[in-house]
Amino acid sequence: MSESNRLRIAIQKSGRLSKESLKLLKSCGVKFNINEQRLIAHADNMPIDLLRVRDDDIPGLVMDGVVDLGFIGENVLEEEQIEREMLGKPALFNKLRQLDFGACRLSLAVPNEFNYQDASSLEGLRIATSYPNLLRRYMQEKGISYRDCMLKGSVEVAPRAGLSDGICDLVSTGATLEANGLYETEVIYRSAACLIQSTQAQDPDKQALIDKILSRINGVVRAKE
Ligand code: ATP
Ligand code: ZN
């Protein structure tokens, strides 16, 4: 496989970060024609290829140097970083900047009837989450032991389904928690989308293009503030 001299940027294919990531690139003057069926979209006016993938794959693609840049939620990025550090795999990246979308928090929540005092109320209980590493780090800092219930989806229904006592999940408005008879007790991590770059050496032309995009992003975000 030959190294491409086009800049590769990974964005979430479809989900909460997709629209805003694309919008930001477009407002930087990058022109794309997205074909929903295709993994790759070539920019018409710059040497840029867009890789449209699951958000969970983006940190690893950047850390392995498969792509040059990635738009990703800090929650997913940090979860992957802890995972890789545990496995002794490369976990390096440069965070170019935080972005003004994708804001959410990773929180502990319990059923309405649960008498919650503090995190130690969860001692020995089972907590459902898609973020086992961020949860473990938080609970270790507090010295609380709990039992895992790893779910990639449907975390918010786990207590009602009798799978767990509480959950640790992403919250933005709290409406999903409320709809499932849960209440938020503690924020364990605050997140927003960010732009990250691979630490692998870039050729000067690619780096110049990255610098140009970053300075345009800085301009676009500043104009909105
Ligand atoms: P994929 O199919 O790409 O794996 P997903 O279901 O894991 O998608 P989304 O629900 O689209 O992911 O969320 C992507 C990111 O959007 C989250 O990791 C988080 O950074 C951010 N986000 C912002 N608000 C919320 C929210 N209320 N719930 C979930 N994610 C949110
Ligand atoms: Zn995902």
Image (spheres, rainbow, N blue to C red):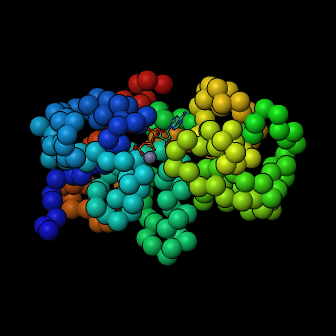
User: Which image quadrant is residue 61 in?
Assistant: bottom left
Q: Can you say whether 104 is above or below 51 in the image?
A: above
Residue 108 falls in image quadrant: top right
From the viewer's perspective, is 206 left or right of 15?
left
Q: Is residue 192 left or right of residue 168?
A: left
Q: Residue furthest bottom?
A: 88
Q: Nearer the viewer, residue 42 or 223?
A: 42
- Image quadrant holding the N terminus, namely bottom left
Between 223 and 132, the residue placed more toward the observer is 132
Q: Is residue 105 visible?
A: no
Do we see residue 128 in this rendering?
yes
Vertical arrangement, residue 101 with respect to residue 148, above or below: above
Taking the spot 44% from the left edge, 65% from the top edge, the residue there is: 92
Q: Position of residue 54 (x, y in %)?
A: 36, 47
Q: Relative to the observer, which residue lies in front, 110 or 136? A: 110
Q: Residue at x 55, y 71 (%)?
A: 86
Q: Residue furthest front?
A: 161
Q: Residue at x 52, y 44 (%)?
A: 153
- Left or right of 84 in this view: 158: right
> What percent of the width, then of the height, locates residue 75?
54, 48
Give the image quarter of residue 16.
Answer: top left
Left or right of 103: which side holds 97? left
What is the x, y in percent for residue 81? 51, 61
